[in-house]
Amino acid sequence: MKGLSVRGVAKSFGPQEVLCGVDLRVPDGSFTAILGASGSGKTTLLRIVAGFERPDRGEVWLGPELVDNAGSRYLACERRRIGYVPQEGALFPHLSVGRNVGFGLSRDAARRTRVDELLELVGLSGYRRRYPHQLSGGQQQRVALARALAIEPEVVLLDEPFSSLDAALRASVRSDVLGVLRQAGTTSVLVTHDQDEALSMADQVAVLRDGVVAQLDTPAGLYGHPEDAAVAQFLGEANLIEGEISDGIATTMLGRLRVGSWSGPSSGLARVMVRPEQIHLGEVGEGIDGVVASYEYYGHDAVVRIRLERLGVPEPGVPELVVRITGGPPLTPGLRVGLSVRGPVVAWPAVPGGAENSRE
Amino acid sequence: MRRGWLHRHHRPGGRRPIGLTVAAALVSAVVLVPLVFLVVQAVQVGWAELRHLLFRHLTAVLVWNTVSLVVVVTVICAVVGTLAAWFVERTDVPGRRWFAVLVVIPLGIPDFVVSFGWRAIFPSIGGFWAAVLVMSLAVYPLVFLPVAASLRSADPAQEEVARSLGLGRVRTFWTVTVGQARVAILGGAILVGLVVLAEFGAFEILGYQTLTTEIYNEFQVGFNEPAACALSLVLVLLGALLLATEDLVRGSGRTSRLGAGAARATKRVTLGRARLGALAGLALLVVLALGVPVGAILYLIVQGGQSTLPPASLWIATGNTFAYAAAAGVVATIAALPIALLSVRFVRPGVLALERVNMLVLAVPGLVVALSLTYLTEHFLQGRFYLTDPLLVIAYAIMFFPLAIVSVRAAIARAPTGLEEVGRSLGVHRHAVMWRVTVPLVAPGLAAAFALVFLETATELTATLVLHPTNVETLATQFWAYQSNLSYSQAAPYALVMVLIAAVPGYVLGRWFDRQPERMAQAGAAPVTAAPALVAA
């Protein structure tokens, strides 16, 4: 197996610069997710790695081999041994499942056995003679994966392979695919706009934004220590409030909070992020006063929106706080509660002028 | 569902389609030759002369004859085609599966053969209403096919909602059902109009004078090229007006269906006592449109009682017709490839304009194409190519080029670049991927394009009469020669072979495409249904 690295890759389509200097290292045998909003260039990056597209600048390395340097060096996609699983599978509609899987294999006696092995690996033994249109979306996706794995690729690229599946199917296909890839031990790169997918599947996640990698970290690192407010909001819900830092403590409207991650001067104005699950609701008087604005019940947990009040009057200019709670009785809007924050929070130096740097 | 990625328009390796663009531009230039040389000829004739030729009583009569016929036939076809489609697709009329096929077959029978059949049985018919009858029976399927398709795909829930809102059955039909099919009806109607404008043989047989019959006579009989040119300008102008209407219609008429939920199977309207009436109506339509012409031909053959088997000239003519039709099919299909490739894989405003330009040919009747090519060879090529095989084949290819483009485009759309990329990523070389993925996916659609042009060419009369090499007879020219001498029973076998060539394979191919699994069926429609698809192109 080989790792993969991308150095300073840039690509424009006409006047529009889609990628402007992407650096990414994918260690051997790891599972990396590239997370980005639609239009962030993540698919283009994948296509450059696969060799379908040439970069304008930069280099692509497969293990020790330079496969594209935006100039004279270019290894054709058919010689890269990169398995590619596109959106919706893109099975060859005129070929049976068996022939789809065996497409990249040479015609010899071993092919049949190999195809059967792969179909078993993805849990579709017995489907060899079916045609793509006779399969469900999830089955098509798994055939596409088997087809990509057939050539024993160094790297497998998955381009939003689950986005066309419905929610119920997505989770199971996702874990099936992850299981298969782990078993095969390949280096895998998944492109997605779904943060749950990225966080739950990957060893490391690269957040792609405005054509560059905004942050590359483990899922926990990314969630716990986002580089900036926009990354924080992209990875799950986040309450962003104003605060003032001094000596590792942020003074905010939620009280004095311990700052776990801070990259500014030792004191000053800051934006402070509190995750919904960090806020604890208690009786009035326990901590900060608030009023329940709405309550959405999801079974495994519930999301409560809280309006902060001072002396019975809503605080001007303060957004509602999002709180995630598990268990307990339903909370009716208008109920008064007390808020307290648990665990360290993340803070960044406040942007002058307070311009909101949020996305979507 | 996101469906975009497969059809990404980025070129692998950043290649720009320069070769394709050049090829497409060259093809378009050739396709536009008839239009261009019609204008060149008009300029050479000069405005004074043109004015003299155009502003006379005869022109007014011809335009009136032509336009009134177009309007009446179009309205009748719209009504008959829509009603027939509704009965077949939406009601429980008995035998509807049979009617779905029988009602379409007349499209394959050449209009001049329908006309011939009626004339053979009722020798006294002629004039305006005979022309209306014959043309309506010959071309109403052009409305039936798209309307039936649109009724099949429309959401039946809309009708139920209308009923629940208190609308009666008849008002529901008018507001909802006709509303759903509006684009299809108007699109089909415009095609009907174009076909009637271009028709020559049927009117000549019925002795009804239109622009085309007069152009033909001025040119072939009177050798009056300036007059033919002047009237051709009027004809093309009328065609262009019709095409422009099509743009208007398409701009305003969008039907929409919210949500991606599959439409339920249509619940058919129970006709009750009206069932027998509907059955009788459809049966009458089939008898008039199919029974009369085919019956007449068979009757003529039997009654003609030629003890000898079909003459050798029938086989020779059939061979020639096949050869021309096959050549035209191949040329048109290959010529359509660059434009179709560009328009599917490299979408840009310029490319779309190029495609639209080629559709202009729809407004140019075959007779005008033939005259224009004649003019070109006489005045610019010192008579070279005139009355040669290549010129005739090129004329056919130009005339039916829009058909080829629509089918080839649909064929190419079935093999998105995404599939080729996946194939290559599996370690298979570009050329091998081409053979194993692209060609198998595209081939059925290309075959459909070929078949469509083949069928149209095999039954083409007007351009063939003008351009066929002197010593080469085709089914159409032989038929015409006998028919003109009133030797009906000798003309009949030629008509029969044309009907067989056009109707039978059309029917078989149509069924074959119908039966393909859903994914395959996108191939680009059955040949018969591709004609109306022009309007949706």
Image: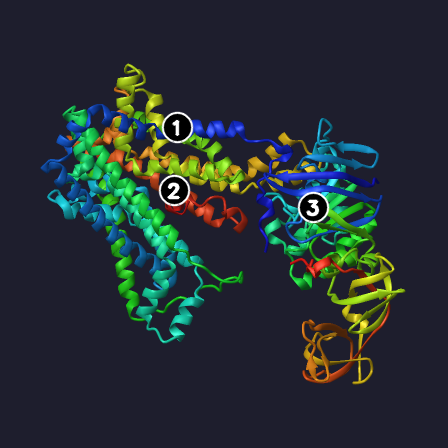
- Disc 3 + disc 2, Cβ < 8 Å: no
Mark number displayed over residue B29: 1
Q: Is residue A225 left or right of residue B281?
A: right
State the SS at label 1. helix
Amino acid beneath label 1: Ala
Give the quarter of the figure containing the C terminus of chain A: bottom right
Q: Position of residue A20 (x, y in %)?
A: 70, 42
Of B470 and B76, which appears nearest the observer?
A: B76
Residue at the far right in the pictured view: A247
Q: Chain of mark 3?
A: A
Residue indicated by mark 3: A211
Q: Is residue B480 left or right of residue A315?
A: left
Badges 3 and 1, same chain:
no
Q: Is residue A240 above or below residue A185?
A: below
Label 3 vs label 1, nearer the camera? 3
Q: Could you tell which of marks 1 and 2 lies nearer the N-terminus?
A: 1
Label 1 vs label 2, nearer the camera? 1
Residue indicated by mark 2: B506
Badges 1 and 2, same chain:
yes
The residue sitting at 33% across, 23% down in the picture is: B391
Residue B482 visible (yes or no): no
Amino acid beneath label 3: Gly
Q: Position of residue B266 (x, y in %)?
A: 44, 64
The residue sitting at 82% across, 47% down in the picture is: A184
Q: Position of residue B261 (x, y in %)?
A: 53, 63
